[in-house]
Amino acid sequence: MFTALIKAGVIDPSMPIYDLSRALNITPSKVRSLIFNWQFRDPQLRNDLTAELRKALSKTRFSKDGTLLTFGIESPLLKEEVAARLRAKGVFADETFSREIVRMPVSAFVEFLDEIVDTNTKKTFVSKLVKDEQLKDKSFKAVAAGVLGKVAEKVAGEVGKELASDLVEAATPVARSFGGFLSGLITDQADKAAEAASELFQSGP
């Protein structure tokens, strides 16, 4: 029935879960379960979900919580995909706070980025930063870790030692550069990612 409603255009599965819950007059957990089962059986979502993950991550907001990076993915299937990919690398994300929120160590997020970012984008991004002498290490993981480390350092400088505040609210210039770095990588815009990363390294502490 849920699938039939989607095919008939009565339900938009991309709507926020809460909005669907109100429209259908059922609980958010029930809606989440219905969407997951629909996504799990959808032929278009049976292949590699990397493109869908990149699309979802390009729209989300990130925050730094101590040693963890936090971000939200409302799609139940993509949320499970993230968790499964992390588990395959021996990393178990903290999912206790919310079913839509993923919290993981920065090092684990670097591994995750290494898996979903296009190979040519990574090569171009790294070559630009190394050429500009921003970083000496030529590996993508090292460069990405260096950028994220610089983000943490700058946020700490702007909001004290508490890194739990949302980057967008706590340090807007840092958030802007971080957003450009991340969205550039995910959308295959190596120049944009490298420019944003350079801003982080060149600006003051």
Image (cartoon, rainbow, N blue to C red):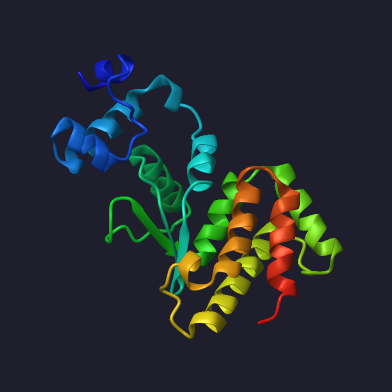
Relative to 120, 165 lies left or right: left
* Residue 162: image location, x then y, percent: 43, 81
Q: In percent of the image, x 46 and y 68: which residue is there?
A: 169
User: Is 114 placed above or below 134 here?
Assistant: above
Query: Picture quarter containing residue 78?
Result: top left
Relative to 12, 166 lies left or right: right
> Is residue 167 or residue 88 the one in the foreground?
167
Question: Number of numbered discs present?
Answer: 0
Query: Which quadrant of the rendered structure holds the C terminus?
Result: bottom right
Q: In percent of the image, x 38 and y 45: which residue is there?
A: 79
> Is residue 77 or residue 72 the one in the foreground?
72
User: Is 36 placed above or below 10 here?
Assistant: below
Relative to 42, 173 lies left or right: right
Relative to 82, 157 lies left or right: right
Query: Picture quarter containing residue 28?
Result: top left
Query: Which quadrant of the rendered structure holds the N terminus?
Result: top left
Q: In percent of the image, x 28 and y 61: which residue is there?
A: 97
User: Is 97 placed above or below 65 here?
Assistant: above
* Residue 70: image location, x then y, percent: 42, 61
* Residue 105: image location, x then y, percent: 46, 66
Q: In percent of the image, x 35 and y 44: which residue is there?
A: 74
Q: Residue furthest bottom?
A: 160
Query: Picture quarter containing residue 39?
Result: top left
Q: Residue furthest right?
A: 131
